[in-house]
Image (cartoon, helix red, strand yellow):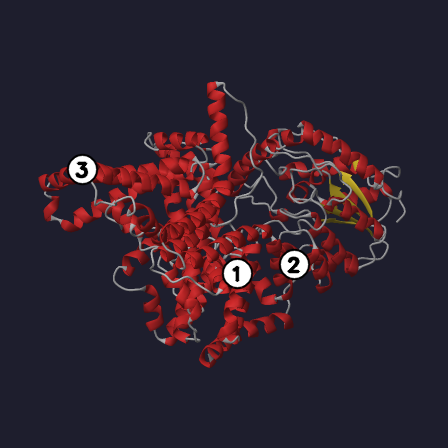
Amino acid sequence: MLFNSLQFLVFFPVVTALYFALPHRLRWLLLLLASCLFYMAFIPVYLLILAFTIVVDYGAGIWIEGSQGGRRRLFLVASLVANVGVLAVFKYANFATDNLTALGRLTGAWGALPLLSIALPIGLSFHTFQAMSYTIEVYRGRQPAERHFGIYALYVMFYPQLVAGPIERPQNLLPQFHAEHRFDHDRVMRGLLQMAWGFVEKTVIADRLAILVNHVYDAPGRHGSLELIVATYAFTFQIFCDFAGYSDIALGAARVMGFELMTNFDRPYFAGSVAEFWSRWHISLSTWFRDYLYIPLGGNRVPRWRWQVNLLVVFLVSGLWHGANWTYVVWGALHGGYLVCGIWTTGLRRAMARAVGLDRLPRALGLLRVLFTFHLVAFAWIFFRARSLADGVHVATHVFGPVRRADLAGLLTLGLSRFDLILAAASVLMLLGVHGVQRWVSITDLARAAPAPARWTLYYAAIAGILVLGKFEAQQFIYFQF
Amino acid sequence: MRTFLGRLLLFLLPLAAGEAALRLHPGTPTWYAAEAEEVRSLPAATAEVVFVGSSRVAAAVDAPGFAERCGEALGRPMHGVNAGRGSSTAAMHALGLRAMWSAGDLRGAVVLIEAAGGVAGITPGWSDAWGETWAGSGYAAMIVPYLRLRDLPELLGSAAPREEKLMLALLSTCHLCEYFWVRRGNALKRAELGVDRLLAPSTTEPSELSAAGGVRNDAAGIEALRRTAEQLARDDMRRQTPVGDWEGTAVAHLVRWVEDHGGQARFFVMPLSPVQQPMLETTVRQRDRDAFVLAAKRWGSPVVDVPFETTGDDFPDNWHMRHSRAAAYTAALVSALCTKERWPGGSGR
């Protein structure tokens, strides 16, 4: 079920009302059933895949906790193999087959290999990673195995974060299912406001920009430099608003019921370096890779060359996690490359700043860093959005082409009217403004602290704003495909 | 919890008051509902002719002119209604015709349906199975005035996307929601036009297009539709799929409904712009067209050819016929249809 659908508009209040009406001992059952219903709105039969990983990991958790030495490791490996196996079959099998077919044709050794005719289950990478996080934490002795099967199933399936995260850790989420949450007016209002902001990001900004981005990126060869540049900037904000919008709705919906999920975004386009960007973007995934891949590989406590290899490995895997396509691998490699280049050029950049006197102007230097980081990230998004590697290369090489004044008229051929273009630009500026203010004070807290008439006006205006300016063609969230 | 519920009630109170006010004072009817009002006032002997189709029909057919000239040719009073409208679906027309029929005795009325709309690709939803498309995406408000409570079981049980069914059910039961949605659409349209007028170079020449049926006839609107038509034609020709069997389609349902209620249906061929015509000249669509002609004959509602020459200049926005050509096309329609041999049921009602 999409958050930006009428179904959810009915589903959410009904489930929330039932949640508070039921005694605590039955609430897990309600949430589990609601989560099944939520997931079954996509492809019902794929609930069986979730059931398979839940059963395997639930058993593995208990067995890991109850065993020692080699057997303990064996149960962990079995659990990881089951989870990665599901990912391999449903997400990567056809990608591997395609590449083997291409290799066979290139060498003349074999012809086309048969593809599996399966659709990728929605949010597979998210709930698989969350399940893996559980068994790894139990193995490391940092989390007791969950004995209540229903609660464990809910940990994997909790509907607000089931299909696109945040990827929770068992230490944060499992205890919250055991605790009783009473109705708290202030918390409910904060949750609803966060949801409203998420809807603004998704329906007003992301889905409007999506029209322009899809138009250009579906056939990049038909567009000139200016159109490619505008579409790339538009995608940079579209993907943020799409994913951060989803996360805000998820966090808000969970908060209304008393659950605190981890923050997933912290104004990432205000980051002063690519490393900082990754501490602000999709935080639940980047910390997952940090804890379960980067640190086990040795992190930065290894020789300098190994550290750089570790960074590249993590970002290549992260790229592949996003999708079974070479475009994602290139996107990951670009980010890994940025970080490695950042290490190489630290001294050089400091010297350059000193040479032009920027070291005496910290604000200007900070702004320059933010702008530079933003453009590096935006450039990498080209490959993330492109439908194929060839399209990605085409856009990446043509965004630097000449831009003529006459090309401005072409912007009106990208699927958005003048009104929509102005609205999209204004809403992006508003987003940046809100992020600028949020550096000092939370917008939600500001709204909550306002006098009642102003607060109520804001509530009505927010709802009317979403309903009037939002795009309601129920566009799927980009990250659902991962 | 009590505080929250109290405030929620306070929040909902103005909305409930709005709903009550709208139920007590319903809005003025539009489209078919407005035509139904007109039909109510006609003398019983007047024969009714209803043109059904897209905004192409709205732009190219002068319905009162047709009724006058056809009435003269057949020797009886006639009243013509042009119900062609942009983004309309066969379901909208079926329910709209029902609204007209309930307003007056329309037995013997002739319903002339755009044949291009009955061929896949041009007008979305016409060649879908009945119940699969009630209103196109973003056009729910167009069908809602004609949906009755008794239609809801059929709507909810139909094969339409769940989201569309929920939207239509909500808008047809909640007057405030419908009111808001219609006003929202109008406000956004006005905002778009306003911004275009402000920023686009304006033309002082009289527009070449009629605004009937929701056609945009300002310079920016014409330019936007030109591009949309080109894009749509390119996209359509890349991924055409055959309709196959026309029997279960929405357009077949529309014909059956007319016949079941004592009316008679005929299809007429609308000329298309040189940008859109190639969409119907592919092998897939040629086969669909042949199958459609045979199916229409089986339904007792044959396709009438209307010989009429056009050029690209006749379609300023690549979609709709120039206003100045409407009279000539209407005359061609009269020549093709209005003889005692060809007119459905001869000259008698």
Which residue, as the protein is rendered here, is positioned at the far top?
Answer: A108
Q: Of label 3 and label 1, which has the lower sequence position? A: 1
Q: Is residue B301 visible?
A: yes
Report the chain holding disc 1. Answer: A
Q: Are callouts 3 and 1 both on one chain?
A: yes
Question: Which residue, given by chain and number where applicable, does mark 3 sit on?
Answer: A345
Q: How far apart, in angstroms, are the residues tagged by discs 3 and 1? A: 48 Å
Report the chain holding disc 2. Answer: B
Q: Residue at x 12, y 44 (%)?
A: A358
Kind of residue sitting beneath label 2: Val
Which residue, as the protein is rendered here, is positioned at the far bottom?
Answer: B2
Q: Residue at x 59, y 41 (%)?
A: B209
Q: Secondary structure at mark 2?
A: helix
Question: Badge 1: few (under 14), some or many (20 or more) residues near its Cα, within 10 Å?
Answer: many
Q: How far apart, in angstroms, are the residues tagged by discs 3 and 2? A: 63 Å
Q: Secondary structure at mark 1?
A: helix
Kind of residue sitting beneath label 1: Ser
Question: Badge 2: few (under 14), some or many (20 or more) residues near its Cα, within 10 Å?
Answer: many
Nearer to the camera, A244 or B191:
A244
Question: Which residue, given by chain and number where applicable, does mark 2 sit on?
Answer: B144
Question: Badge 3: few (under 14), some or many (20 or more) residues near its Cα, within 10 Å?
Answer: few
> Residue A343: x, y in percent?
20, 40
